[in-house]
Each structure stands twice: as structure tokens, then as C-alpha cells.
Amino acid sequence: MRHSRQPTTAVLTLLLLGLVVATPAPAKLRPIKLAAQAGRVKKGTEKQTCFPIDFPRHREVDVDHVQIFVHGGSHHVHLYRPTAGPVEYPNPDKTYSPAGPHNRRPRECAFAIDFSHWELVAATQSANLNWQLHPGVGIHFLPQQPLLIQTHFVNTGFGSAELAVKGRARAKMLLYPMNPGAVTAHGGALFGQDRTVLVPPGLSTQSSTCALTGPTSDNRPMTVMALTGHYHFRGVKFEVWKTLVDGTRGQLVYENVGYSDPKFQQYSLDDTRSPLEGGKLELQPGEGLEWACTWQNDSTETFPFGPNTQKNEHCNLFGFYYPTDDPLEAIDCVHKEDGSEVRILAR
């Protein structure tokens, strides 16, 4: 980043005479590039891979614009950063090992990442994500911070989606740094997951809730910048409502019909439009979100929760919000198999 220079006496004179117009705004800082090469995906299979990488900067950076490009057709691409404590990477057998040269290579990881080790930063389910955060809001990265990219490519040609991977599967992320002086709040990611999902034959719906702002006494308002819903190919509708302080369902704020290219709904600061139309989505202290999945299962089997699109189903909610209480924060709201809710604020 270039240091600004003081204007010369001649320039100051011209400014006083009104003969020099204001200089243009500085060009956007060069984006930070992260890449993951998943390679070939055999026909009839799906491939989930974890890529350990490091943030390629030697100073703290805040990012206010994220682009993710996916080649080959994909189920999803996620970016994670570690939670507090020792950095441990996932192994193919679902165990985790301390960081070191022996486990810095890409590896199979056909399962959900353990949120006690890693927290979500960004996510996409489409071929091209172009996400501009709200003014003054930045996602915080530490110098040389360990990161993890997880890709899931599906080449089964199975179900209504007829998913296929063409050529070598890969993903590229561009993170655009912002001027440090422009940061007024830090953004965090929220992830809601219901592991009690069970999809019987026919048409069915299941909903889950999370009190994202905590109890009213926490006095924590939250502005949501974006939401996207996730299920497997039997999914036909994903809906999200605001939940009120008393736990009742409020207004509908997100709706996606169908499976392919799920909507990445960005919310503005325009409070004259409803959130469903892209207007402002703000949660007051004590409020939260309820999300629901509707599936059409045309088989005679019942599908439980799990990562495999052919054998399992999902009902996951991804979101992005501010302000955070800490520059490095994420909210994970997981309904475990026994029906209990686990809420983690990772720092």
C-alpha cells in the first residue's frame, strides 16, 4: 500500500483558486487469492476434500468483499479458520491431528467439520459468488493464520438435480482487503444444523430454531448481511423466519424453491423494503431465526442426516452478521441427534 504524500505548494494554490478537482478515490487493494484443486471426480461418486492453507499476509487484514469461483459443478465450498486453542487438522477417519509438516497435504474429509476446532468464514453453493459486505464491515484475518478450505463435488448424475462434474474440479477465492481506517465493525458467520433430520417417503417438512442473539438480557442486536439454505437433491423448499422474543414465528425472511443453485440472499440497509425483498434484516436482543426444509422423497427409503447426497439428507442454514463481540467470532447452532441444542461462540 503506497504512503500518501502532502500536496505541493503549487497544488495548494490551484486548489484555493478552484482550478483543481478532487483526486479520484484510491484503487481497490489487490485481492488475496486462495485456491483448492480437487482434481478428477469419478463418475458415480462424490468427493469431499480438505485443503490446509495459510493466510498469505504478514499483517492483520480486514476483508469487505468476497468472490468464490467454482469450476466443474459443485455441491458446496467452505472456508474455515481455527477456533481458540491448538490448531488441529481433520483426518479421513474423522480424528484431528496437531498442525505440522506431516499433515499439511490435502486429504479426504467426507464429513462435517468439527466446530470445536474450526469456525465458518465464507460459503457458496453456486459457481460464482460475488458478495459485498455492508459498509464499514470487515471479516478479520490474522497474519499467516491457518485456514481450511473444504470442497464437496458430486458426480453421480443421481436424482432430480442430475449433478455432474466436468473436467478437473477446483475452486478459487478472492478476498478484497479494506482500508483499516474504514472498519467500523467485524463480521461473523452463523451456521445452523439439525442432526435430527429424517426424511421419510413422500412429502415432508422439518423445522429448527436458534436464539442467535441469546437472551434479552444479553442486549445484543444483530444485523444479518446474507443467508443461504442447504439440503440435498430431495429438497424442494427452504424457508427462514425471524423468531420473536417470546419464541413465536415472525416474518418470512428467506425462501428458496428447488435444489439447483440455492439462493444466496444478500440483505441491504434499506428498511423501506421487507427482508424477503432484500431489505434490512435486523434481529433485536432475544430474537433469532427458524429454518425449515421441505423434501419430496420419491423412493421407499427413509434418509437420515449425513453428508452423502445419495444416502443422507441435510437441513443447514448459513448466514453472515455483525457486529461481533470479538474480531474472530462465529455462531454455531447445532441440534444434536438427541435433540439438544449446542450454541458456540468461537473466539
Image (cartoon, rainbow, N blue to C red):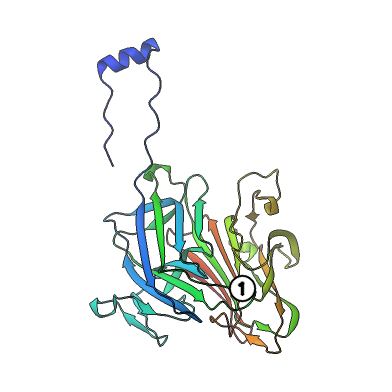
The residue depicted at 55 percent of the width and 69 percent of the height is 191
Q: From this viewpoint, is residue 324 visible? A: no
Q: Residue at x 42, y 42 (%)?
A: 182
Residue placed furthest toward the top: 17
Say few, some or many: other residues with alpha carbon within 10 Å of mark 1 (under 14 / 14 to 19 / 20 or more): many
Q: Quadrant of the N terminus?
A: top left
Query: Picture coordinates of residue 115 (x, y %)?
Result: 47, 75
Image mark count: 1
In the shown orientation, is residue 335 left or right of residue 31? Answer: right
Location of the C terminus (image quadrant): bottom left
Quarter of the view holding residue 201? bottom right
In the visual, does 31 lie left or right of 271? left
> In percent of the image, x 48 and y 45: which residue is there?
136
Residue 50, given in percent of the width and then of the height, sits at 39, 74
Residue closest to the far left: 101
Query: Dot 1 lies on which element?
Result: loop
Q: Is residue 306 visible?
A: yes
Residue under numbered circle 1: 231
Q: Quadrant of residue 158?
A: bottom right
Q: Does 96 appear above or below 284? A: below
Question: Percent from the top left, x then y, of residue 247?
Answer: 72, 68
Horizontal and vertical percent position of residue 21: 40, 19
Does 279 appear above or below 324? above
Q: Is residue 106 left or right of residue 347?
A: left
Query: The residue under label 1 is which amino acid type?
Result: Tyr
* Nearer to us in this view, 188 or 196: 196
